[in-house]
Amino acid sequence: DIDFFFNVSFFRSNEVEWMNSLLPVASEQFEIFFENERVSILPTSQESTMKMQESEESVEIWIRKKDDRFMTRTAVIDKATGALTSFRTNSGKDILIGNQGLKPNFTRASTDNDRGGIDRIKGLMPKWVAFQMALIENVFQVFSYSYIYQWRRVGLDPASPPNIKCTNMEITVYDKHVSVLTNCSVTSASDGKIIMMHGSSYTFSNDGSVQIQSTTVPTQLLSPLPSLPRIGVAMCLHQSLRNIKYLGRGPYENYPDRKEGMPIGIWKTSPRLMGYDYIVPSENGNRSDCSWVSMTDSSGDGVIIVGHQKATEATDDSILDFGFSALLHSQQELHSATHTNELEDRLESKDPIFLNVDLFSQGIGGDVGWLPCCHKEYVLKNKFYSGSISISPIEGDDDHASFARRKIRSQLTSQLHNYRSTYER
């Protein structure tokens, strides 16, 4: 099966002073779905061999390809956190730098709308007025606290993200792939309370790719929240992977509730172009409804991330879209800065790239800026979240769109529903 998009645009027949006739007056995009299109399948490498090597600290995946004399370590999982800490391209370049690796991500740099609430209003008032407001609030409970205030109280502070600890790991070695199943507790950095349970299933194939299926279950401590900020993964990438190509909404930043003006297409960008320098730094640069994204260096060596499946207890579907941003500053840096002059000026190809991949994310909101008001269809209030992506090495002569389509159809038998059932039980 495959999607096509039919684009319709309307233009003025004559030019006026206030508008160029080449600019569309209105536009719309229609999705056309075709069934049973013949698409070749990516075969598993018949001439590659792989092995798993385990130590007290980590699990290593080694592969020897057809023309290689020795085996090469292609991936590493840290036993303490369950995070993927190393992943190599076909040329041997490790895309992950720093000591964090690819890890679950549940926070975001707060936006102006995230900060809007009675706590912010009281902070701008004289103390005696704020005191009176507090009395009214305690009696009538008519005021709403900001999203960021509520997130901080339960341990979802972007300045001090929750800690991830792997509590159990199961490893299974097959002929042409290795499966690593991790169960992790997510604890508040401030008080150590468990706020989520998170599990990941890594399936490494002998072609050098890995499919990551994850399930996140919030605990009762998070039930009072109006919404979670996001459910996804974050990683720090090698600085050379600056050439970004993706199938999704573009060309400018967009979010679940801010995307209708951005058509779906295949777009090219870079970390410098993806971000937006808001005067007060915040979450920015996201691209929504993405099927795949590739990140490569000047020679075309790099990786491609493909969305496969996601579900909640409210929806059980095969939506293949995700959101992502690739910026030159981390979420912690963006959240902590109060002005752009507090952010270090960084350069592409010299400084690392901070990549966020969101399977689920809250909308931006903004009907008013002084109260939390994200519409209910764009908040995250489900009992669990499951999703699956794959990361594959690519080379300069690969057609990224064709590779992604074949990868979707050649993925290993999904364990998503069975894995989710273990948490339901």
Image (spheres, rainbow, N blue to C red):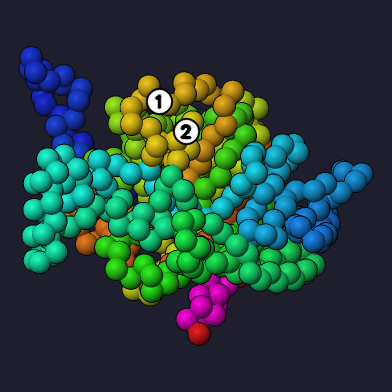
* Residue position marked by numbered label 1 in the rendering: 342
Percent of width and height locating residue 285:
38, 37
Residue at the bottom extreme?
A: 425
Residue drawn at x 53%, y 30% as measured from the top left: 243
How far apart marks 2 and 1 lie (CA) works out to 11 Å
Give the total of numbered labels. Answer: 2
The magenta segment is 414-424
Q: Earlier in the sequence, mark 2 or mark 1?
A: 2
Percent of width and height locating residue 415:
58, 72
- Element under label 2? loop
The quarter in which the N terminus is drawn is: bottom left
| Left or right for 305, reference 7 | right
- Element under label 1? helix
Magenta region, main secondary structure: helix
For label 1, the crowd category at 10 Å Cα-Cα, with few meaning under 14, some 14 to 19 and many 20 or more, is: few
Q: In the rendered structure, which amino acid carries the disc numbered 1?
A: Glu
**Does residue 2 show up?**
no
* Residue position marked by numbered label 2 in the rendering: 329
Residue at the top extreme?
A: 17
Q: Is residue 420 magenta?
A: yes
- In the picture shown, does residue 61 fall above or below 402? below
